Image: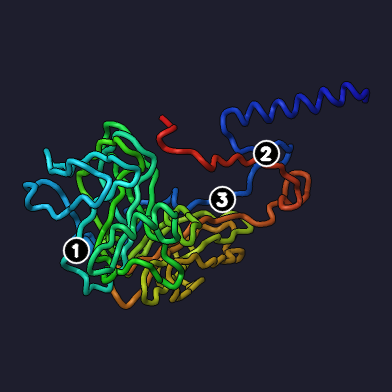
């Protein structure tokens, strides 16, 4: 083949790949076979498949929230520094920043004896200008604002530990600033240590600030409001599309398994106590009396994923009923089933080679620093 002809064919192939990239498709540029057979259980999930569940809401504590519907004299928030004109108007706490470190603060007078861990702070507000919202706490009896300003100006460790980008404009935005929790369930913010709540609603001078509500979401309240069903859940910055269930619920799937089947699965929980995950199976038409347990894993460490792959080779090509269930001492205890997928192993292609042996090229594009206010 002449060199020019070879270059032309390579160029054509690269242009073909780039054409696909222009529409944001994750693709293979090789001539390999189609992907292995998979069954995503989240696509098969239907609320009607849940057995033994309860429609009763999970009882949670009363929220810790400040709203500004009452007259100004009844609201406890104060202007710390960097703001002017603090007042309550039309259901909003309003102020104007006159420095780049405007601070509003409140002292909590109840709940200080509570050992509950803070999960997040939710702020609903609009601000005319600025790039960042920030929140911090103090457990001191007397709040030292000069120390707070000094920490901010020096960017000292621990100053304003909860932060979120701002979306400046005329619309009310909801900002949820989530705390970081380790696998050992340690947090810097127990309720007993949050005597003073400080909010830096913007980081520029001359901004108009209107706050509709400020809410502290503690762990029990957060857990009580996680519904059963499909959602995104993350542990240690690893996020998975997840099936959420509560004890003693059981979710059943009727499936046709592919050849070489195996169950790709991770489990985890946010609960302090032990949670037992069970995966079982019965052949089609065999009834519940013939159910066999394929996996029983008790999780005692929250806030981490535990990989639990299951070999289903024995049932390849069969119609089966697969069930997932969670057990715990306390009813309505949460269990997370991360990315549950039935996959096919060692599928043979038309060339006679195992699919795992066939080379495939994948181009992955990651958008890392996108800001929500830069998208439509």
Residue with the mark numbered 1 = 108
Residue 34 lies, in percent from the top left, at 65, 42
Cβ atoms under marks 1 and 2 closer than 8 Å: no
Q: Is residue 161 visible?
A: no
Residue 40, which numbered label?
none
Q: Residue at x 32, y 78 (%)?
A: 329
Distance between the alpha carbons at the discs numbered 2 and 3: 18 Å
Residue 64 lies, in percent from the top left, at 20, 59
Q: Label 3 neighbourhood size at 10 Å, few (<14), some (14-19), many (20+)?
A: some
Q: Is residue 112 above or below residue 176?
A: below
- In the visual, does 20 lie left or right of 358? left
Q: Earlier in the sequence, mark 1 or mark 2?
A: 2
- In the visual, does 349 lie left or right of 302? right
Q: Is residue 33 visible?
A: yes
Is the C terminus in the top left, top right, bottom left or bottom right quadrant?
Answer: top left
Q: Residue at x 20, y 61 (%)?
A: 107
Choose between 121 and 56: the one closer to the eye: 121
Residue with the mark numbered 3 = 38
Badge nearest the viewer, 3 or 1: 1
Residue 288 lies, in percent from the top left, at 40, 69
- In the visual, does 339 lie left or right of 230? right
Q: Is residue 265 above or below residue 70?
A: below
Distance between the alpha carbons at the discs numbered 1 and 2: 57 Å
Distance between the alpha carbons at the discs numbered 3 and 1: 52 Å
Choose between 289 and 245: the one closer to the eye: 245
Residue with the mark numbered 2 = 28
Q: Earlier in the sequence, mark 3 or mark 1?
A: 3
Q: Label 2 neighbourhood size at 10 Å, few (<14), some (14-19), many (20+)?
A: some
Badge nearest the viewer, 1 or 2: 1
Q: Is residue 311 above or below residue 343?
A: below
Task: Examine the image and state in which quarter residue 48 appears.
Answer: bottom left
Q: Earlier in the sequence, mark 2 or mark 3?
A: 2
């Amino acid at each position: 083949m002449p060199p020019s002809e070879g270059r032309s064919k390579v160029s054509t192939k690269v242009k073909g790949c780039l054409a696909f990239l222009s529409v944001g498709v994750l693709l293979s540029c090789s001539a390999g076979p189609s992907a292995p057979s998979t069954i995503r259980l989240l696509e098969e999930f239907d609320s009607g498949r849940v057995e033994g569940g309860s429609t009763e809401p999970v009882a949670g504590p009363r929220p810790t929230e400040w709203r500004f519907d009452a007259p100004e004299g009844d609201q406890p928030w104060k202007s710390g520094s960097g703001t002017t004109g603090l007042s309550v108007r039309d259901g909003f706490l309003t102020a104007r920043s006159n420095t780049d470190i405007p601070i509003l603060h409140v002292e909590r007078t109840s709940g200080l004896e509570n050992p509950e861990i803070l999960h997040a702070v939710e702020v609903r507000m609009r601000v005319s200008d600025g790039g960042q919202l920030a929140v911090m706490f103090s457990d001191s009896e007397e709040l030292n604002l000069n120390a707070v300003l000094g920490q901010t100006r020096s960017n000292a460790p621990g100053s304003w530990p909860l932060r979120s980008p701002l979306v400046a404009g005329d619309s009310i935005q909801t900002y949820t600033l989530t705390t970081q929790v380790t696998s050992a369930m340690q947090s810097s913010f127990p309720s007993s240590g949050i005597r003073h709540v400080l909010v830096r609603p913007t980081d520029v001078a001359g901004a108009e600030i209107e706050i509709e509500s400020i809410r502290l979401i503690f762990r029990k309240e957060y857990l009580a409001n996680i519904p059963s069903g499909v959602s995104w859940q993350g542990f240690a910055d690893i996020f998975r599309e997840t099936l959420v269930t509560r004890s003693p619920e059981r979710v059943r799937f009727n499936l046709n398994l592919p050849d070489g089947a195996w169950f790709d699965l991770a489990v985890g929980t946010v609960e302090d106590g032990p949670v037992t995950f069970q995966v079982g199976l019965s052949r089609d038409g065999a009834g519940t009396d013939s159910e066999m347990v394929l996996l029983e894993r008790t999780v005692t460490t929250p806030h981490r994923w535990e990989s639990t792959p299951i070999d289903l080779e024995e049932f390849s090509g069969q119609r089966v009923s697969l069930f997932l269930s969670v057990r715990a001492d306390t009813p309505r205890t949460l269990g997370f089933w991360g990315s549950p997928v039935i996959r096919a192993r060692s599928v043979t292609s038309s060339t006679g080679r195992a699919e795992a042996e066939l080379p495939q090229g994948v181009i992955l594009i990651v958008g890392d620093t996108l800001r929500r206010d830069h998208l439509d």
